[in-house]
Image (cartoon, helix red, strand yellow):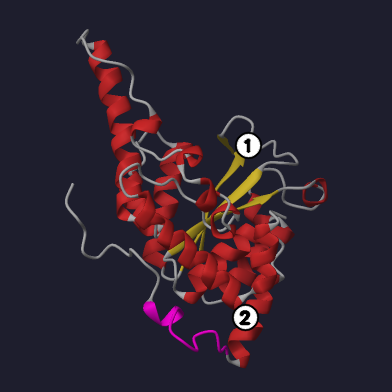
């Protein structure tokens, strides 16, 4: 696969320029609103990265509680639940686009249309622009609700992951599919493709790096490729540094995995 010159490989340089941590009153108020969203610190961090322009889009999950289910409109459409509709409105108020994807049973990984229960996850795509939010929504809908294959390259680009990491994961999935197709045609072949042939296992990363705060936190993690993991780490570090600079509260909560 060729290199895409338009791929967002790193966050905008202005986020890391000297003095970029100087926020005006409106920006500070917006960050405070993100810090108070009723979602996990990791999802708050992802929204902060999208809002700041460091990341084109993200996926967040809201886990339903018994209290949510005691409200009205719980028969089928989770977006009509008071807390969910309020959350969507609060995110949209940040000048971001929110697209509902599905409500997922985390035990089965299947999308639900009814019989919702505590622990089910309501998933959204969030982006700076409507087109990018739609891409994420479409690919995640394919994952949970259709027979269409997920285009991991299209999805990964929309989420701002490194091109090398995304294409390595796609190559792994393609190799698995090719192996299964060959089996059906009784074509002799070698061992079944292993993820470790394409994706860097965390245990293979030197301990000094593996235990670094930027790597062990829960801010926008993704799988590193076997061939380019060192360059890809730089983006993970840049995202972590951005969150730490803009919201120490969210950063430390992610570090503690709250």
The local secondary structure at tag 1 comes to loop
Residue 143 percent across, percent down from the top left: 44, 39
Q: Which residue is mark 2?
A: 30
The local secondary structure at tag 2 comes to helix
Q: Which mark is residue 106?
A: 1
The quarter of the displayed image where residue 243 is located: bottom right
Was residue 30 drawn as part of the magenta stretch in this picture?
no
Query: Seen in the image, is 222 located left or right of residue 176?
Result: right
Image point (30%, 26%), residue name? 177
Magenta-drawn segment: 13-23
Q: Which mark is residue 125?
A: none
The quarter of the displayed image where residue 176 is located: top left
Image point (54%, 65%), residue name? 240
Examine the rendered structure and indicate whether residue 1 appears above or below residue 114: below
Image point (66%, 73%), residue name? 248
Dominant secondary structure (helix, strand or loop) of the stretch shown in magenta: loop
Residue 242 percent across, percent down from the top left: 52, 72
């Amino acid at each position: 696969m060729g290199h895409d010159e338009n791929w967002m490989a790193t966050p905008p340089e202005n986020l890391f320029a000297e003095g970029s941590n100087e926020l005006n009153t409106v920006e500070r108020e917006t960050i405070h609103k993100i810090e108070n969203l009723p979602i996990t610190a990791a999802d708050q961090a992802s929204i902060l990265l999208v809002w700041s322009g460091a990341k084109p889009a993200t996926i967040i999950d809201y886990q339903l509680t018994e209290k949510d289910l005691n409200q009205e409109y719980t028969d089928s459409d989770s977006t009509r639940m008071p807390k969910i509709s309020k959350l969507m409105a609060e995110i949209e108020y940040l000048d971001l686009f929110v697209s509902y994807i599905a409500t997922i049973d985390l035990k089965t990984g299947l999308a639900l249309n009814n019989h919702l229960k505590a622990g089910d996850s309501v998933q959204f795509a969030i982006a700076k622009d409507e087109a990018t939010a739609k891409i994420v929504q479409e690919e995640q809908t394919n994952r949970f609700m259709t027979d269409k294959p997920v285009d991991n390259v299209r999805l990964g680009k929309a989420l701002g992951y490194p091109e090398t990491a995304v294409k390595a994961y796609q190559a792994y999935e393609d190799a698995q599919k090719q192996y299964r197709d060959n089996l059906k045609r009784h074509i002799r072949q070698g061992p079944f493709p292993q993820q470790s042939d394409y994706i860097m296992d965390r245990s293979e990363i030197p301990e000094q790096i593996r235990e670094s705060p930027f790597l062990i936190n829960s801010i926008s993690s993704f799988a590193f490729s076997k061939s380019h993991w060192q360059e890809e780490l730089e983006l993970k570090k840049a995202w972590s540094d951005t969150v730490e600079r803009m919201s120490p509260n969210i950063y430390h909560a992610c570090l503690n995995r709250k």
